[in-house]
Image (spheres, rainbow, N blue to C red):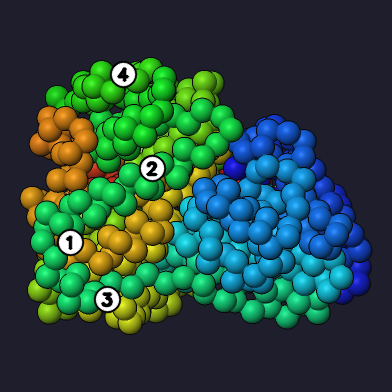
Amino acid sequence: MCGIAGEIRFDGRPVDVGALQRMNERHTARGPDGQGMFISDRHGFGHRRLKIMDLSDAAQQPMFDPVLGLGIVFNGAIYNHADLRRELDALGYRFFSTGDTEVLIKAYHAWGPDFVKRLNGMFAFALWERDSGRVLLGRDRLGIKPLYLAPVAGGLRFASTLPALVAGGGIDTSIDPVALNHYLSLHAIVPAPRTLLKGVRKLAPGTLLHVEPDGTTREQAFWTLSYERDAADESRSFDDWREILLDGLRASVKRRLVADVPVGALLSGGVDSSLIVGLMAEAGVHELRTYNVGFEDVGGEKGNEFAYADIVAQRFGTVHERIFVPEAELLHRLPDAIAAMSEPMVSHDCIGFYLLSEAVARHTKVVQSGQGADEVFGGYHWYPKLQGSQDPVADYLAAFRDRDHAEYLEVVQPAYAGDDHTARFVAERLRAPGATDPVDQALRMDTTVMLVDDPVKRVDNMTMAFGLEARVPFLDHELVELAARIPARHKLAGGGKGILKEAARQVIPSEVIDRPKGYFPVPALKYLQGDVLERVRDALTSQAARERGLFQPAYVQRLLDDPAAHITPLQGSKLWQLGLLEIWLQTHLH
C-alpha cells in the first residue's frame, strides 16, 4: 500500500519536477517507508512506499524493467501474485524481486491490458511503455484504491489523493455544480468520475484509462457487476447457499493473509468483523492482534461494544486491545481527520476511524476490516422497502436522499441550481442492464457507487493517514459476484443479511449475531453543539464562504438557528453537511 503520483506531457515540454515533488510529499503518510521518482522527457512518476510485500529494496518504486522497457507505480495489494508469478515463470519470465509489483509489469507484457482481469486484489497503478510513450492507468473493480486525475496545460496529472493534485498546482479548483448537487443529496457522496472540484476527476472503479503520447485518451471498463441468475441459482436451497457462501468467505479472508508482515484485524464486535476474526483464526493465524474502539456513553446510549468484541477475542484467543476515545479527544482531533480526507465525508465514523488507525498503526501495518457486508448482503433498512416496488427510483430516493430538489434549490445560490442531477443519476443506475429486481438494483447501486465513495474511501483515507493498510474481504470481487447470484430473499431473511448471519453462525458465537446492530453517533456532529457548532458557524459566515458563494444565507441561518431540527432521512445533520464542506475547502484550498 502506497501513494502514487505522476505527470504525463503531451506538448514536448519537460515534466514539472517541482509539482511532482509536491504531490509525492503530500503522500508521505501513505508511504512512510521509502520514496522515489522517475523522470523522462515526457513522463514523471512519484511513489511513497509502505513495505508490506517484499521488504527488500528490490521492490522499490517507481519500478522499471529495462529488458521489457516497462515501468510502473502501484498502490495496493495483489493477493494472487504468487499464482501469477508461477504462470509467468512457465512462460519464461525472470524476476528480480519477490513481491507483487514486478508481477504486474510481466503480466502486462505477457497478456496486454487484459491482465487486470486476472488480478485478485485492490489496486491503482500507472504503467508506462518506454519506447511507445503510452501510459495505462487502472483502478480495481470495487474502487478500494483511489486514483484522481487532473488535466493541466499540455498534460495530465494523477495522484492517490485529491489534495496531492491541489498541491501540484495549476488545476481548476472551482466547484462543479453537478457534484455539489450529488454531495448535498447523497450524504456527501460524489460518484465517479466527478469530484467537487471542476479540475479534478477520479477514475471509475473497474476501469482502465489508455493515454496515448499525443494526449488522446480512451476509457475501458473491464468489470461490471451482474445480478442475473440462472435457474439453478434461483432454485438452490438456503442451506446450500449458506455453505457455498461460507466457502467463499474462507477463501477471501485467506487471500488477504498474503503479506511479509503480520496481519491483524479491526474487531468492532459486530457480525461482520467478528466473522473475519473467526475465519482468520480458523486459517491458522497465530497471535492474531485485534483492535476495538469505543466512545463515551451519551444520553443512556451505550458508546461502545467492548463486551461483544471481548467475547470474540476470548473465543479465538486474540491479542486484543480496547481503545477508548473520550468525546473531547474526538472533537479536538476533528481538524486532523478533515485534513486527512481526500474529499469531504460527513460520516461520524471518520473521526473514530482516524483515531483507531492512529492507535493500531503503532503495532500493526496491515489489518482486515469488515466494510461492505451491509451493501453486498442486504443489511440496510431500505432494502425491504424496495421488495416488490412499483417505482424503485422514487422509493430509493425517499429512503436515501438527504433533501429533495425543491429544498436543494433553497440551499444553493442560483449559479449552482440547475437540474435534478441526482434523481437522473439514480434512475440511470437503477435501470441499467444486469439487474431487474428492485432490491438487486439497489444492492448494485450501493455496492458499486455508494460503498466506493463512503465506507471504502473512509477506510482508505483514515488508515493511510498513519501508513496502515486495510484489507476488506467482503469486497473480494469473486465473493461479490457470488453474492450477486444469491436471490435477494435469502439476503433479506431474518431482518437483513440473513444468509451471511447463518454462515457466520458456523464460525462465531451466536450472542454476537443475535443482537441489535450497533451505531455510535458523535452527538456534537449530529446535533451540532458547543465548539463544533461555533466552528461551523464561523466557517459558513466567513469572508471565504461569502466570496465562494455556494449557499443562500437565509437557508444557512435557518439551520444555524436550530441545528437539531434539520436532520436527514439517514439521521445526519444538514448543517454539518454544509459546514464540513466549507471547512474542508478552507483546509485544502488555502
- Tag 1: amino acid: Tyr
Residue 309: x and y, percent?
26, 25
Query: Is residue 70 visible in this depiction of the protein?
Result: yes
Residue 502 to residue 523: above or below: below
Residue at the spot x=15%, y=57% of the render? 240
Mark 2 nearby-residue class (10 Å; few <14, some 14–19, many ≥20): many
Mark nearer the viewer, 1 or 4: 4
Nearer-N-terminus badge (1/4)? 4
Q: Which residue is mark 2?
A: 253
Measured in 3D between alpha carbons, the distance from the residue under mark 4 to the one under mark 3, in whole angstroms, is 41 Å
Position of residue 486 measured from the top left corner of the image (x, y, whole percent) = 21, 63
**What residue is shown with label 1?**
383
Q: Nearer the viewer, residue 218 or 419?
A: 218
Of residues 399 and 140, the one drawn nearer to the viewer in this rendering: 140
Task: Give the SS element for disc 4.
Answer: loop
Where residue 226 appears, as percent x and y from the top left, is: 33, 73
Say which quadrant the N terminus sits in: top right
Residue under pointer 4: 317
Q: Which residue is mark 3?
A: 228
Lower sequence index among marks 1 and 2? 2
**Is 333 above or below relative to 181?**
above
What is the distance, in whole Å, between disc 3 and disc 1 at their CAs? 18 Å
